[in-house]
Amino acid sequence: MWQLCLSMVERLGIIVMVAFLLTRLSYFRRLIYHQQVDWTQRFIIMVIFGIFGIVGTYTGLTVHVETFEVAKWTWSLKENEALANSRVIGVVIAGLLGGWQVGLGAGLIAGVHRLFLGGFTAVACGVSTIIAGAIAGMVHHHKKRAFALSPEVALVVGMAAETLQMLVILLVAKPFDRALLLVEEIGVPMVIANGLGSAIFILVIRNVFQEEEKAGALQAEKAMRLAEATIHHLRNGLTPQSAKAICELFIQEVPSVAVSVTDRAHILAHVGAGSDHHFANEPIQTETTRRVVETGEMLIVHDRVACHDPHCPLHKAIIAPLKRKDETVGTLKFYFQSEADLSSITFEFVKGLSSLLSLQLEIAEAEKYYQLMKEAQIKALHAQVHPHFLFNALNTIVSCIRIDPNRARQLLVSLAYYFRKNLAGTTEMLSTLEEEIRHVQAYLTIEEARFQDKLRVRYDIEEGFDRVVLPTMTLQPLVENAVKHGLKYMKKGSEIVIVVKADRDMVKISVSDNGKGMTDEEVAQLLRTPVASSKGAGIGLYNVYERIKSLLGEEAKFAIVSAKGKGTTVQLTVPLKEGKEGDVVAYASYRRR
């Protein structure tokens, strides 16, 4: 019996070979991963496992029931002969992986074949093979995929299926005495061998896929690491400088002899073999690269790379497009020494890198347009000098010329500074708190002269914060908003208070008025969207809020406290940091673009 068991275990090498070959089939892989498999592909898998069961039948050992002599390879059985075989393995695996339809189909193919092979156990073995496929399929449907792909489960189901076959032989095969002797002789070896065979089959499949998944995970991790390393190089788009930095980084991480990046017409950078004659700013030399630029599809160059230098060491290449939206803006090229380097894993890795770089180029482009939009908003804010303000200021100055020339001269100086600051703000992103306060003072000097005793301005500014850096045109819109809207309906007693105070490692800047105030709904609306105004573009307060969020980061706070009839306070809280020359810097995340 044990000699029979060893002989059957020897045949498990066929199972390993079949299992590995099946992992090469794309639709079999989709079946393993529970992806969509159509009925045609499912039928093919059913036939494959059915044939696997037939092969297991033919590679079995013929056992003479009376003498128990064992013979190898048989094409038909006599009435007093039976088979010790591994037929049930293919049927069980079909059911575990494909479900009851695949398992039952494979069982029918292998079972009907066994029925016509002959022998006194033909009916019993044929029927039990069909039942084994259905049972394995039921295990597949009632358990998760990870459970079905467990070698332990395959071992138990394989042994159970073979045990079932032994019971069916005892129930169906006649005469019973001969069936009993047969089961005593081959039962244990077949249960052990078929259980082990099923477990080994699943183990081979799982290990192959696990190794591939591990390799893919490593490649993905490397791709993400490279993407993170290259992201700051591509902030300004695809340039010779960024291309060279990318090539120098990639050649260290990817087993290639050279790396090159081009735009649509020229080589931007080339690092590695061939750099003695592949220079930056030269036109693209090869037709394959031009084809990638035109089609936007990846290409593998199997022949020698076309080059004007006959001694060029570049032979094989993978060329991937670099895209921005749907437009191909350049190529990424990896050069290799041999055909073996052009593996599918390398191809997918290069494809992933090109996709990541393309995404970064799109982000860089979007960020560029975003900054242009923000600058346009800032310029719109700076240009928001209303004609009525200018006319009123000039009228006030004219009225002062005769009765108070010194006052008129002071107002002209303030008006000149106000306009000069507005014009300078169209090109400057940052200014100091001192400059912001002077801008506000110039504006309020004119407004106080207009309203005379109606408006009073009070400053409460802590010393030591003159060099605090803020986004330009931060305070003036807040003060102007208080004058135009907060004090609009007050006939006298109007007051604006500007406060600058330290609060630990923060500085708080507030502009308050004692005007009519706003409801909570009006305050929320101000911070959600620009509010239309009959005397302006309506973007002042909202624009300041948006710029503070984008330029100062999450550490900065912008708050509006208001109530009907009780005035309004707009408070800006910013973090304090030391500048390069000892200046106090009040911005967290702003960078000069």
Image: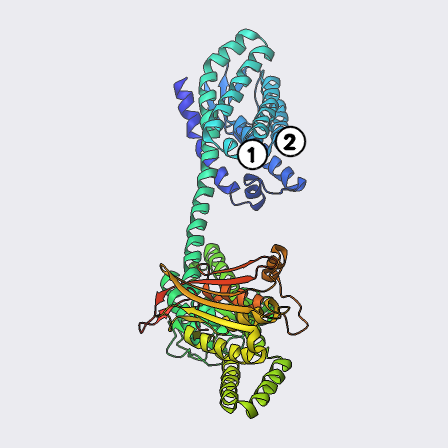
Indicate the secondary structure of the residue bearing disc 1: helix
Which quadrant does the N terminus fall into?
A: top left
Evaluate whether residue 322 shows in this view: no
Residue 187, image x, y percentages: 48, 16
Quick one: label 2, few (<14), some, or many (20+) residues within 10 Å? some
Percent x, y for residue 154?
Answer: 49, 28
Question: Which residue does the numbered mark 2 point to in the structure image?
Answer: 101
Badge 1: residue crowd in 10 Å (few <14, some 14–19, many ≥20): many
Q: Give the residue pinned by disc 1.
A: 97
Q: Which mark is residue 47?
A: none
At horizontal 65% and vertical 37% (from top left) the residue drawn is: 43
- In depth, the one of 344 and 497 nearer the eye is 497
Under mark 1, the amino acid is Leu
**Nearest the camera: 137 or 499?**
499
Question: What residue type is disc 2 on?
Answer: Gln
Element carrying mark 2: helix
Residue 554 higher or lower than 386, as above or below: above
Q: Residue 583 appears in which quarter of the rendering?
A: bottom left
Above or below, 205 relative to 566? above
Q: Is residue 214 left or right of residue 32?
A: left
